[in-house]
Image (tube, rainbow, N blue to C red):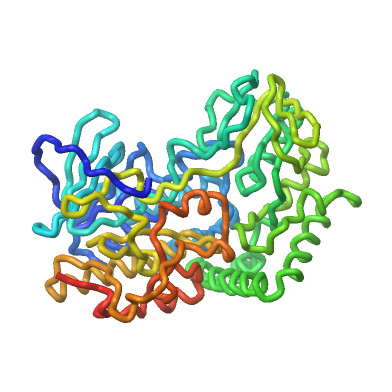
């Protein structure tokens, strides 16, 4: 929702007070907690997590084959080397995060089973009051915090996005979404249709192909893919030379980031060349004569939507084996036995998986208010995608579309810690981003330019997101290569920050 309701009055109860309250114990929240302990060692903090475990996406998503679609040399934290294959399973990522928590004594700061209902700011007290419910006991709990750090992610964990098609209620098999994969679902010997063509579908299809009678990836339109070994040659060579892992981690990260920046730039400057390179990879992994034009040639230029990496070409191996297939068509309706397509073709299915994306959830379904007034998040203007006009003492982590999320989580953590230390040194209790006089005539635009990047979840949820301006300070540039230098150089005494 774009407007948060004023929460109902609750009975007075004792609140625990912290300097910083972090929302979410996923990759951003755990990283933020680490940076606080290192950069702001005197600050008290707590991490509230609605689930019963850390990990966020990597804990809630249980579908077969779940893995990262970013390399772990850059998706991993900059402060802890990643030493295994670059594309990692959810189990491996959770193990890595668990090591971060254990090695840095973060566990006592994390409160699981805490669902936040409301967060209200008082300018009189310069405090956030956070009301939550213990999902394990049902108890109502209250916290106050000087600073709120939103690390809860950007989608609704409880339910994925599934379009409504005619006849869904008539289908006699099971319809499931990967985000809420049933623990009792057995695909062995079944005919499965996976609707979608993104990273989830590309992961799920090869993971179940060996067990199903057959699995079909049904897509309305094709997606770009990159194939390659699930290994980094440079990392292997450096290990063979017995280079220290911390050095390997930094060198490989820089190499990957450089190559990604070059590739992204080329997708804008020579999109047709990049397109043919991507399609050549696909053709090289499919039988001669396969209809790549229909099934793997998107109509948009590369990087207008996220490009999924297919490690060791496993999706294409499944297609070549005959255990998996791709159908490019539109759904007319569901039937008792499967799906009727607009072309007239019928797909039989015992199980239909809707790998159709997720629901954008910009503030964790929390009812926010400021001095008694509901916060209309979409009326604010973003300060570099981290803070928002009129919203005091709050930072938000939103990562990169074309690079690993954690890269920006680390940069935002540096900024937040520097801001907190700056406020303490100057004796400030409050900071609110505000447009400067020279910004008042600035055109206000959607959060992201749809001509630049337009995945479905962003387009569906654009009305929920803040506005951006036409100056770098007032937008999320999605450019790590620039932000790695720009964010550390932010002038905290700039007029965009109003202190009190």
Q: Can residue 264 be seen in this view?
A: yes
**Residue at position x 75%, y 35% from top?**
342
The location of residue 362, given as percent across then percent down, is 39, 51
**Residue at position x 19%, y 57% from top?**
44
Q: Determine which quarter of the picture holds residue 240.
A: bottom right
Closest to the observer, 46 or 464: 464
Q: Can residue 30 be seen in this view?
A: no
Closest to the observer, 457 or 53: 457
Judge from the rendering whether residue 446 lies leftward or rightward of residue 131; answer left or right.
right
Q: Is residue 423 above or below residue 332?
A: below
Picture quarter with the C terminus: bottom left
Judge from the rendering whether residue 373 lies leftward or rightward of residue 273; answer left or right.
left
Picture quarter with the N terminus: top left
The location of residue 394, given as percent across then percent down, is 27, 60
Closest to the observer, 189 or 87: 189
The location of residue 210, given as percent across then percent down, is 73, 34
The location of residue 73, given as percent across then percent down, is 53, 62
Q: Determine which quarter of the picture holds residue 436.
A: bottom left
Q: Is residue 191 above or below residue 20?
A: above
Q: Determine which quarter of the picture holds residue 213.
A: top right
Q: Is residue 375 above or below residue 171?
A: below
View extreme (right): residue: 289
**Residue at position x 66%, y 38% from top?**
195
**Residue at position x 61%, y 58% from top?**
305
């Amino acid at each position: 929702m774009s407007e948060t309701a004023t929460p109902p009055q609750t009975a007075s109860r004792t609140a625990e007070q912290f300097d910083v309250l972090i929302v979410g114990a996923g990759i951003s929240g755990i990283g933020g907690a680490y940076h606080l302990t290192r950069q702001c060692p005197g600050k008290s903090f707590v991490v509230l997590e609605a689930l019963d475990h850390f990990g966020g996406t990597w804990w809630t998503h249980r579908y077969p084959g779940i893995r990262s679609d970013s390399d772990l040399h850059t998706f991993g934290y900059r402060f802890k080397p990643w030493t295994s294959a670059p594309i990692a399973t959810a189990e491996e990522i959770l193990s890595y995060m668990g090591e971060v928590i254990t090695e840095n004594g973060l566990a006592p700061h994390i409160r699981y089973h805490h669902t936040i209902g409301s967060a209200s700011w008082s300018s009189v007290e310069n405090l956030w009051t956070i009301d939550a419910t213990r999902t394990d006991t049902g108890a109502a709990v209250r916290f106050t915090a000087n600073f709120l750090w939103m690390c809860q992610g950007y989608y609704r964990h409880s339910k994925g996005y599934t379009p409504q098609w005619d006849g869904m209620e008539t289908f006699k098999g099971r319809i499931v979404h990967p985000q809420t994969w049933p623990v009792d679902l057995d695909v062995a010997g079944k005919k499965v249709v996976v609707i979608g063509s993104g990273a989830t579908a590309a992961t799920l299809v090869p993971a179940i192909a060996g067990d199903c009678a057959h699995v079909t990836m049904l897509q309305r339109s094709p997606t770009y893919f990159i194939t390659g070994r699930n290994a980094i040659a440079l990392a292997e060579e450096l290990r063979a030379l017995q280079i220290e892992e911390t050095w390997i981690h930094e060198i490989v990260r820089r190499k990957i980031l450089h190559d990604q920046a070059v590739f992204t730039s080329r997708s804008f400057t020579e999109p047709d060349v990049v397109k043919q390179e991507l399609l050549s990879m696909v053709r090289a992994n499919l039988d001669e004569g396969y209809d790549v034009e229909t099934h793997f040639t998107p109509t948009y230029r590369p990087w207008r939507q996220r490009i999924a990496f297919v490690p060791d070409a496993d999706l294409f191996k499944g297609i070549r084996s005959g255990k998996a297939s791709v159908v490019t068509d539109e759904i007319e309706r569901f039937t008792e036995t499967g799906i009727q397509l607009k072309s007239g073709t019928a797909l039989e299915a015992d199980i239909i998986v809707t790998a159709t994306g997720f629901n954008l959830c910009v503030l964790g379904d929390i009812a926010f208010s400021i001095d008694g007034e509901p916060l209309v998040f979409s009326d604010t203007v973003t300060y570099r995608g981290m803070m928002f006009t009129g919203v005091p003492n709050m930072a938000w982590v939103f990562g990169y579309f074309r690079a690993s999320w954690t890269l920006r989580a680390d940069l935002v953590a540096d900024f937040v810690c520097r801001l907190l230390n700056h406020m303490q040194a100057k004796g400030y209790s409050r900071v609110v981003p505000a447009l400067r006089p020279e910004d008042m005539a600035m055109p206000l635009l959607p959060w992201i330019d749809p001509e630049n990047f337009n995945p479905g979840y962003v387009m569906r949820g654009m009305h929920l997101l803040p506005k951006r301006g036409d100056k770098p300070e007032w937008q999320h540039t999605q450019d790590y290569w620039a932000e790695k230098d720009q964010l550390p150089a932010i002038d905290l005494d700039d007029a965009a920050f109003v202190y009190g």
